[in-house]
Structures are given as C-alpha cells and as structure tokens.
Image (cartoon, rainbow, N blue to C red):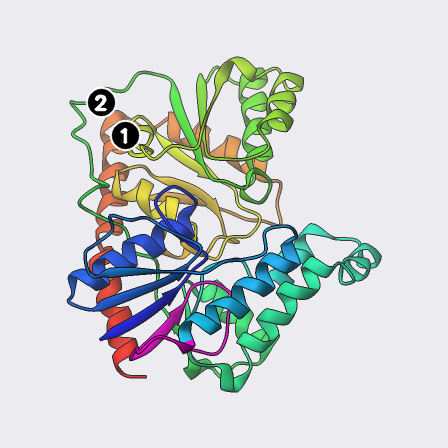
Amino acid sequence: MKIAVIRRQCTYHRGGAEKYCADLCRHLAELGHRIYVVAEQCDRDLHPSIIHIPVAANKWTSPGRNRSFHINSQKALANLAIDCSLALSRTYPVDIYRVSDPLHYHWMSLQYRNRWLLAFQYLNPRHQTILSLDKYIFSKPNCNLIIANSYLVKNQLISKFLIPEEKIHVLYNGVDLENYTLIDSNQNPKDCTVHLLFVGNDFRRKGLEYVLKALRHLKQKTPIACTLTVVGRGNKSKYVKLAHQLQVEDQISFKGFSTEVIRYYHRADLLVLPSLYDPFANVCLEAMACGVPVVTTESNGASEIIDEGINGYILKPQMPLDDQIVDIIKRYSNLSDIEKRARSISAHKRAVQFSIKSNAKCVANLLANI
C-alpha cells in the first residue's frame, strides 16, 4: 500500500511519540509498503521506501503552529496518490487517527483545578485551537477509525466525545526489541544503592517533583541509599532549585536529552514515572524490555501492561504520590538479589509481547481494511 503518515516530527531525536512514529514508519516500510511522511521534520535514513513530504508550519505562536500544520498537511495530502492515511498529529480528515498526544480537555482539567481559572483558560487562543481540532477530528465524518494506545484513552474518548466503542481500536505501543534488550546480570553487578531512573521531556506532567520529594523522605527517615538519574528535556533549573531546597541535590544527576537512553536503562534498578497524565508513556515499555521494573500511576496508560509487584508497581493518583514511591522503594530494597532478578526478567517477558514489528503489522491490517 501507499500510506501517508502525518506527524509534525518523525524522528529519534525528540520524545516518545516522535520516536514511535519513526519506528512505525520504518517497520511499515520493511513490510513492503511505500510510506509518505507528511511532517515538518523527518529523519533522513529511516528506510529507502520512506519519502518525506515537507510541511511548513507557522512557528511564531502555538495556535498558529497547530492550525497551520493541520491546514498545510491537508494540502500535501491532496497532492499525493495514496491508498490510505494515518494521522499521529492533529489533522482531519484522515482514514485512521491515532491518539498520540494527551487529550487536551483532560490535561487542562488537571492543570487548572480551580474551575474559574479553568473557565478563563478556555479563552486562551492556544487551548481554543487544540480543543477545536480535537472536536472536529473526533466528529463522525473526519476519520473512519481511531487507534487508542490504552483503554484509559478509549474510555476518555467515549465519555467526552460520545464515540461508538466499535470505532475505537486499542493498540498498545510497540518497542524495538532488537535495540532494547535484557542485559546479563553479570555485566551489570548491583550494589546496595537503589538506582532510580526518570525519563521524560515534560518534567511537570511526568511527575518529577514527587520523585524528588520521595528522595528527601528516604534520606531523612531511612537508611536506604538512592540515586536518581534524570534523562530528558525540561525546565531543569526549577528542579535543580527544588532538589537543593530538599537537600537531595547530591543524589541527582541531570543528563539532558539523550539518544543513547538504553545505557541508562541498563544501569537502573527502577524506572520511576509518576505521571499526572500519559496516554501511554513509551519509556515504560522500553525500560521493561531492558529488564527494568516500572513505577508509574494509573493515570498512565502503560500501567495497563504492568502486573503489580511482579514487573512493576502502580501508584494511586488519589493518594500522595511521594509517600507511595517511598513505600515501593522500601519494599524493593528488602528484596533479595534473586527476587530482584526475577522481577527484571518478568518485566522483559512482558515487554516482549509488544514488539514494534507486531504493532506495525496490526496498523497495516487496520489500514488495509478501512
């Protein structure tokens, strides 16, 4: 098939959604399909059968950027001789729309708890633009099928937009099992320190604050030694200041964005991602593939593939997140080396069920049957 895939950025040099898009396009191409990536940015060396269709967007303002990308990507689609279209960014009409970014109405309700402030924010041009795009995308004529990457998202779509259940197909993210591998325990001998890892580009939404607060509690009230490695783009200065205030700055290392995050997975005991909201954080799947159990919230769709206490731990968003993280680290530190290794192997085995190869095959089948 000739497939158009629309995503503002299709690259291994941004976040999880952009990386997933690059992986998906590459594996769809390996299945024999011709892929047209309609994007502002696309990595050049993904696959010979991938053609980048450049789309410009107004970068001066957020409303202009979102609206212009939608309009210009539709113009690009009109000039392509394709069999089907798959959007991973906000645009319509398309054959299939995959929800890759947080549903904006829900994230707004979490950001602005005060109902008056929330009502005021609805006047913000950025929010108006994104909410309008979401409204039209999920209207009946503008896409034939919706892919949700978790049941969390599916239920939100049904509740908010009254979309028929049969129109939504849940397909969890996929991970490249050739790159994200389980390391031999002999290659990475563990010490008595619990090595925590946080990977994400939105420190606020991903809950970094709660990990720092948990470190303070552990330092003050337990003998457990912990380190935290933070990988990703974010407002570093704010959290460096917070770490200093909490007197845990000596335990934290900010690495910035990295294309070699695998080496951080292989050094970690636990991935801690107390997300306030995530459709499905792909880093959870990557970490599990590398044998790292995951600590995350029910508000992260990736929690749906975690078996509590076996290959990870699930936090309740209605309870203090930092206290729950402390309790989990206490429990983990009391495990024997054999028990820790068993959880590592269990995490890997769970991730193996969600390869990007099988994910791409499922997407191709859905496109073929539109």
Q: In which quarter of the image is the N terminus?
A: bottom left
Q: Are marks 1 and 2 in contact (CB under 8 Å)?
A: yes
Q: Is residue 358 visible?
A: no
Assess disc 1: are there few (<14), some (14-19) or many (≥20) residues with their C-alpha within 10 Å of its C-alpha. many
Q: Distance between the residues labelled 1 and 2?
A: 7 Å
Q: In which quarter of the image is the C terminus?
A: bottom left
Of callouts 1 and 2, which one flags the residue occurring earlier in the amino acid sequence?
2
Q: Is residue 138 visible?
A: yes
11 to 51, vertically: above or below? above
Q: Which amino acid does label 1 sit on?
A: His
Front residue of 109/364: it is: 364
Residue that label 1 marks: 266
* Secondary structure category for the residue under label 1: loop
Q: Where is residue 39 in the image (x, y as percent from the top left)?
A: 42, 59
Magenta-tinted stretch: 78-95
Horizontal side of residue 368 vs 226, given as left or right: left
Query: Residue at point 46% right, 34% down?
Result: 232
Front residue of 250/192: it is: 250
